[in-house]
Amino acid sequence: MFTIRNERPGDWEAVETLTRRAFYNQYIPGCMEHYLVHIMRGHEDFIPELDFVAELDGEIIGNIMYTRAWLTDAAGNEKPVLTFGPVCVAPEHQRQGYGKALMEHSFEAARALGYDTVVIFGSPANYVARGFVCCKKHRVSVEGGKYPSAMLVKELVPGVLEGRDWTYRDSPVMAVSEEDALAYDSTLPPMEKHWQPSQEEFYIMSHSFVD
């Protein structure tokens, strides 16, 4: 049986372990995403109502977590939006529709809370099927007017961003200290760090911009 529910304190260790397994060596040798999960829950920008786990036959196999973020227009008006991450599914259960179900469930919950926009950083190949588009299509840039190739936008309410230029700002909790993350990782059961091609793909995508 497959179910989606809000995360509970008793799930924290399982979710961090799952996140570590899902991300280890994907983007760097090792990973920092499990440390972000560890510190995110205690931050003022974390949204517990949008923290979900996916269970398969009673086992947690997926998780998605949201924090507040902001868009500012040219006149200085600020608009609260959402960002999610990490979002993960256990490696042995990936590409089976569980991540899709988790995201779609969270989108409906976000709409119910009154949010209308989600901005994320990720590989377009993983998210365009969920309605995300290049940030430039909605005139959403980072500071300096640049449009990162990995920055994607989804309107939960169609047309809500039309007619203005926007600058994106995420929560300070997203600025993870690599030193702190590595120190935390060293307290956990050892996993082998190694290079794999996805790390080069991540480097290229994270350093690319759309003209």
Image: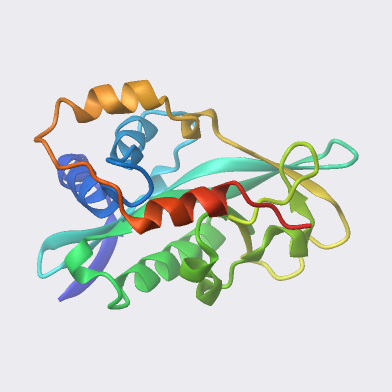
Q: Is residue 134 left or right of residue 180?
A: right
Image coordinates for residue 166, horizontal then vertical, percent = 79, 48
The quadrant the N terminus occupies is: bottom left
Q: Is residue 198 left or right of residue 134?
A: left
Between 95 and 47, the one nearer to me in the picture: 95
The answer to whether residue 160 is seen in the rendering is no
Image coordinates for residue 180, horizontal then vertical, percent = 33, 21
The quadrant the C terminus occupies is: bottom right
In this figure, what is the number of numbered marks?
0
The answer to whether residue 78 is seen in the rendering is yes
Image coordinates for residue 196, horizontal then vertical, percent = 31, 54
Kindly indicate the quadrant of the structure image that contains residue 17: top left
Between 125 and 25, the one nearer to me in the picture: 25
The vertical placement of 9 against 90, above or below, is above
Kindly indicate the quadrant of the structure image that contains residue 73: top right
Q: Is residue 31 left or right of residue 43?
A: left
- Residue at image location 55% in from the left, 72% down from the top: 128
Colour logic: rainbow
- Residue at image location 54% in from the left, 52% down from the top: 204
The vertical placement of 75 against 87, above or below, is above
Image coordinates for residue 169, horizontal then vertical, percent = 65, 38
- Residue at image location 51% in from the left, 73% down from the top: 130
- Residue at image location 64% in from the left, 51% down from the top: 208
